[in-house]
Amino acid sequence: MTIAPDKPETAEKPVPEGYVKLTIDGEEVIAPKGELLIRTAERLGTSIPRFCDHPLLDPAGACRQCLVEVEMGGRPMPKPQASCTMTVADGMVVKTQLTSPVADKAQQGVMELLLINHPLDCPICDKGGECPLQNQALAHGRAESRFVDTKRTFPKPLPISSQVLLDRERCVLCQRCTRFSDQVAGDPFIALLERGAHQQIGTAETADVLDLASRTTGGEPFQSYFSGNVIQICPVGALTSAAYRFRSRPFDLVSAPSVCEHCSSGCAERTDFRRGKVQRKLAGDDPEVNEEWLCDKGRFAFRYVQAGDRIRRPLVRNANGELEEASWTDALRIAAEGLLKAREGKGGAVLTGGRLTVEDAYAYSKFARIALRTNDIDFRTRAHSDEELAFLGSTVVGTTPETGVTFGEVEQAKTVLCVAFEPEDEAPIVFLRLRKAARKNRTRVVHLGQWTTSSVRKTFGELLACVPGGEAAAVDGIAQHAADVDTALSGEGAVILVGERAAEIPGLFSALLRLTARTGARLAWIPRRAGDRGALETGCVPTLLPGGRSVADDAARAEVGKQWGTELPAEPGRDVTGILQAASGGELDALVLGGVDPNDLPDPDLARRALDNAGFVVSLELRASEVTERADVVLPVAPAVEKSGSYLNWEGRRRDFAATLEGTGSLPDGRVLDTLAVEMDADLFTQTPAAAAGDFAKLAPVAPSVSAPSVAAAAAPVPNGKAVLATWRQLIDNGSLQDDEPHLKGTQRPPVARLSAKTAEGLGGTVRVSNERGSITLPVEVADLPDGVVWLPGNSDGSAVRAALAAGHGALVQISGGDQ
C-alpha cells in the first residue's frame, strides 16, 4: 500500500465574526470591522506619518500626510487615500510608503506643501528637538523645495489665554486643538477662522481683534480647565506654553515619570526638570486612568516648590516667643521633650492635611498610636461628620479596581448619578470620562445639584435640582419624583458618584446606601484631595487602624499591636472637630499637624483658638502658614517632587512614583516622624518610603467590620427670609499649591455669586452674602438655581467662604444688595 505524502497546509486561517482580512505591504492581517487603516498598520508595526491623527480624537483627514495606496476588489483607487479616515475592508490591499513609490511621492509632496509658509523657527521654537514636523520632514520630505516665494508672516505670539500662546505661521491646520477643545473638553472657544489660504486658528476674541469672521459660538475667550493639552498634542510649535516658553530645550531636560499630587484621580505625568528646577509637566500615557490628558492644575501648578516662603531648616520658638532656625538635632530633641510631657499629661493629637502619600500617612498613623499612644488622629481637615466616618469604614475602605468602580466602568456605564459632586472642579479627569461616556456611549448622566453647571452642560446631563442640604431627601424621593431615573439606576451598569461635600448633608450617605441596596447601582466616593484615600487605608482616622481594622475590635487591635510590637490604645479617638474643641478648652497638651490650613476647616476661628491654647504644637510644613505662626517647633518636609512614594486614587489604585529631584536634602514626613519617634523611645520603621510601604504591606486589608450608617434624611433648609448657601471650591482657585504661577491664575474663572432671577431682583449688580461671622460681596450672575439659594465659589478672589463666613454648603445666610 502506497501512502501519499502529506500535503503542506494551505488552509486559510478563519476570520472571526466581526473581523476582516486585508493585506498591508504584502502581509495578511486580520482586523476588527470599523478599525481605521492607520491603526491596523500600527498594530502590524508599520508607522505611517501623520499630523492630524490622534487615537483619542475623531478622524479629520486634515493634513493628508498619511496617504497610502489602496486597492479594492483588484482595482486600485485612482489616487492615494488618507489612512486616518479610511476603515479596513475585507480583501483590501494596502501599500504604505515602505512598498509604494506612489504613496512615498504623495507624502513627500504633502510635506512640501506644509512647509511652504512654515517659518525657519527651529533654533528658537520650543518644540525644536521633539517636533513631529522636524522628524517627518527628515524622514518623508524632500531635500529641496520648489517653492521660493516669500513666506507668509503674522504678528506673534497671539495669546489664546494667559497660558497658551499661538504662533499662527507655524500652524499646519491639523485641527487637533480645535477637535480636542470641542470633543474632549467641551470648550469650543478655539476654532478655525476664515477659509482657503487665509484659514487660521483663533478664538472669537482674537477674531474680533483681527476683524475676522468667527465660527465659534458665544463670542467667549478660550477658557478651559484643560487648555494645556492642546500644547502637548500640537504636532508643531504653533501652540506653546507661556510658562515654559524659551525656558529650555528638550535636550537640556531630564525627564522622569511621576504622579499628579493635586486631586484623587492620580494622573500619570512626565516631569521635566533642569538644574534642580521643574520646568514643565506633561501628561503620561495611562489608558486606565487619565488616558493622555491632564487638567491645567496638574500641568501648571508646580512652582510652589520654589516659593520664597518655603521652609528649608527647622524652626524652634525661643524664650522671646520668636521662631528661629535650629539644627535638626535640637529641633527634634525639643519636639520630643514637649510631646513626651504632653503624653504623660493630658495627651496629644494628630491632624493631617490631604497632601500625604500612602507611606507618609502610614507614618502619621503609627506615630499617633505608638509615640503619642492615642487614637486622636484625623485626616479630614475639612467639613466632616460621624456619618461620613461610618460610611468610609463600611463602604469605601479596602475597595480596589477589582472590587470597586473604575474609570473604565464610569465610561461604560449606562447611567451615572452624580451627587454632591461637581466633577469638572473636584475631579476633572472623571469629568472627561463622563463627557466621553455621554458623547461616545450615550451614557445618561444625571446630576443632583443646584444649577446647570458646566459639568451638567458638557456631559449632556440632566439636573435634578434641590435646595442645598436637601440632597438626602431628594435621593430618598427619586423613586417618587424621578421614576425614570430610578428605573435607569436599577438597570445594568449603573454607577453613583458621591463627593466629599456629602459630609455636610446629614443623612445623605445613608440615603445613598439605601438607594444602592434597592437599585443595585454601584457607589463610588470621590474625594477632592490626592491623599485622602491613602490616609483612610492607613488608619488616619479615629476609629480605624491600617487595613480597615476597627479600633474597637479587640482581635484586630491585637493583630496590629503584635505587628508593631506594642499595645495599642483601645478607646476610639476624637475627630477633627473633637480634637480642636479639646485643644481649645485646654483638654489636650499637644498637637502634631501635617500640612493643615485652618481656613480649610469648618470653623477656622476654632482652629486658631485650638492652636493658641494647645500646650505644645509641632508642625510638619512645606511653606510658612498660619500654623507656622503658632507652632513651637516647625519641621520642614519634602514636596512630592522631591520624594518617592505612592498615592491611592479614588478607585483604590496604587500610583507609585520615584523622586524626581534627588539630593535636595529635604526629608519626607515619614522620615521626620521616624526620627522624632526615636527621640521618644519608639520605633516606626518608616525611615524611607520603601520601608514604610513594606511595613504597611504586612497588614493586609480585612473585610470591613464597621456598621454602615443609618441616619434619617434631613429636611431641606427653609430660608425664612434668608438664603441657603451652596458652595464648593473651583479647580483653579487660591489654593496654596497654585501659588507663584501667574499664567494659571489668569485662567481662574471670575468669582461671581449665582442666584435665580427672582432671588436677584432688586439686588443690583452685586450681592452681599453675610452672617454673624462676616460677609462676602461679589458680582451677581443669574442662573437656574432654586429660589432662595445663593452659590459662592469656596476659595476664589474675594470669596473665601470658610475664612469669611465659617459656613458651608446648606448654611443659612443673609443676602442684600452689595451697595446697601
Image: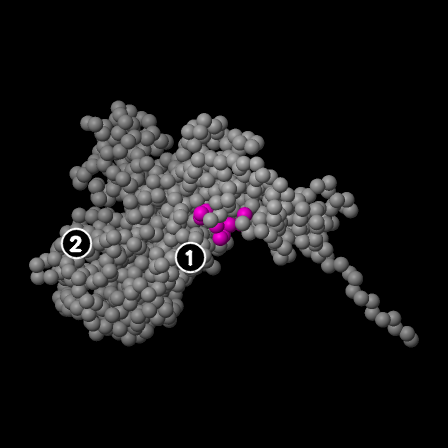
Q: Position of residue 406 (x, y in %)?
A: 46, 53
- Residue 570 image-quadrant placement: bottom left
Instruction: Specify few, some or many for label 2: CA neighbours under 10 Å numbering under 14, 14-19, or 20 or more.
Output: some
- Identify residue for label 2: 629
Side (left or right) of 352 relative to 457: left
Quarter of the picture containing the N terminus is bottom right
Q: Earlier in the sequence, mark 2 or mark 1?
A: 1
Closer to us: mark 2 or mark 1? 1
Q: Dot 1: what SS?
A: loop
Looking at the picture, which amino acid does disc 1 mark? Leu
Side (left or right) of 526 relative to 491: left
Could you tell me which residue is drawn at 28 percent across and 59 percent down? 541
Q: Position of residue 468 (x, y in %)?
A: 31, 39
Q: Is 75 in the magenta? A: no
Q: Residue furthest top?
A: 762
Res 812 visible:
yes
Instruction: Specify few, some or many for label 1: CA neighbours under 10 Å numbering under 14, 14-19, or 20 or more.
Output: some
| Predominant SS of the magenta segment | loop
Could you tell me which residue is drawn at 61 percent across and 46 percent down? 144
Quarter of the picture containing the C terminus is top left
Which region is colored magenta?
124-133
The way the protein has been coloured in the rendering is one colour
Q: Is 131 in the magenta? A: yes
User: Where 689 falls versus 816 (above or below)?
Assistant: below
431, 561: nearer the viewer: 431
79, 469: nearer the viewer: 79
Q: Position of residue 504 (x, y in %)?
A: 29, 46
Q: Position of residue 521 (x, y in %)?
A: 46, 49
- Identify residue for label 1: 253
Q: Dot 2: what SS?
A: helix
